[in-house]
Image (tube, rainbow, N blue to C red):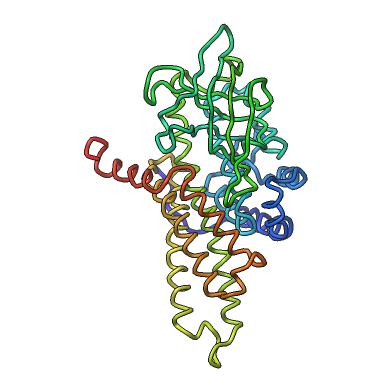
Amino acid sequence: MSAPLNFSISSDQQALVDMARRFGEQRLAPFYKQREKEGAFDSETLLEMGRLGLFGIELAEEYGGLGLDCVTSGLVLEALCRSDYNIGQLMVTMSLTGVILSGHGHPDVVKPWLTGMAAGKLIPAIALTEPSGGSDAANLSLKAHREGDHYILDGEKTSTSFATQADFAVVWARTGGAGPKGISAFLVPVDQPGITTSAFDDLGGRAAGRGAMHFDRVSVPASHLIGDENQGFIQVMQGFDYSRALIGLQCLAVARQSLDETWLSAAGRQSMGKPLTAHQGVSFPLAEAETHVEAARLLCLKTLWLNDQGLPHTTEAAMCKWWAPKLAFETVQTCLLINGHGAYTEEMPYEQRLRDVLGLQIGDGTAQIMKLVIARQKAGRKAV
């Protein structure tokens, strides 16, 4: 029997969230723009986050995590992303990597990579998308064939976050026939001979270092196969049901921070002898955004709660993924406009936030794909 739905936060959860919020305000927010210019995360910050246990909240203690529930992981992510959206991109990648490797990999093989990741010493990448595939995630061309006790990987991955920063990657390759049933996943150290990477000059999300990864006869031990051969597609789809809810909170945190700032700034400014918030043309759009952001946040938390209970949440996860990034973009845009001409500069954070959240209307599944997932869940795959 599942636990009852509870909207309260325990004292332990609140303490962890408060610590994450303080860390974000003190160590992340002041360098949000600097990290964009550098196009990477600095190792000192990542190591400090590792020491504080901010990576791998839901990862088992044996792998260096805190072993807590997914709701707590989402709350911590949300607290940090209010200060720096891009740190959430890394945390989501770590959470998805942790779920896949700890759930399907050989413990002795994956443990050093997971413990290094949780400590902030190692950065993972999710290498799934290919140039000819895009939203058709099962249409993979990168091949892996077995030679003795190794697999040989040949092909290219694209649109891979942390492609140029990663120490290791979870790589999906075709090991069997056509379609999703012929795909396997591998843990691949990025310093292997035959791997080259290239960076993209993106509009936003630059600290994540999105780029391409090329594999030219890359040899990977057979022990680095994650789970069973030809079952890799199923594994990643299950993991995405978790990461999509996290992505929702990642984007909504930016909207939440922008709203809080804008209520304060609008209340402190005068127009026609009244505070701006006394004018319905200002307060009503903010009130609408408050309603939508709160509703979307509750949906994301419900999805994580369903995950913790072991209940189906594919539909809810898809709802989080298509709605939250779009809503966050619209909310930040509203806040920029209400803050006026001063916000239409690089001196204020709204322009960077807009560019950052826009990327997740594309990455990790477009709105069209998410709506297709929802329709199939409701009407049946054969009916859609």
Q: Nearer the viewer, residue 93 or 203?
A: 203
Is residue 260 rendered to the left or right of residue 322?
A: right
Q: Nearer the viewer, residue 75 or 210?
A: 210
Instruction: Name the residue: 60% across, 30% down.
Output: 169
Residue 228 in the image: state x and y as whole percent.
47, 19
Q: Among all residues in the image, which is located at the extreme bottom?
A: 273
How many numbered marks have been drawn onto this rendered protein structure? 0
Instruction: Name the residue: 57% across, 70% down.
Output: 260
Q: Nearer the viewer, residue 225 or 60?
A: 225
Q: Which quadrant of the figure has residue 273? A: bottom right
Residue 59 against residue 340 in the figure, above or below: above
Residue 161 in the image: state x and y as whole percent.
58, 40
Is residue 346 rendered to the left or right of residue 248?
A: right
Q: Nearer the viewer, residue 183 or 102?
A: 183
Q: Among all residues in the image, which is located at the extreme left?
A: 383
Residue 289 in the image: state x and y as whole percent.
46, 68
Q: Among all residues in the image, which is located at the extreme right?
A: 44
Instruction: Name the residue: 46% across, 25% down.
Output: 232
Q: Which quadrant of the figure has residue 238? A: top left
Instruction: Check the picture and name the quadrant holding the C terminus.
Output: top left
Residue 268 against residue 368 in the figure, above or below: below
Residue 156 against residue 17 in the figure, above or below: above
Residue 127 in the image: state x and y as whole percent.
54, 32
Instruction: Check the picture and name the quadrant holding the N terminus.
Output: top left
Instruction: Name the residue: 57% across, 66% down.
Output: 258
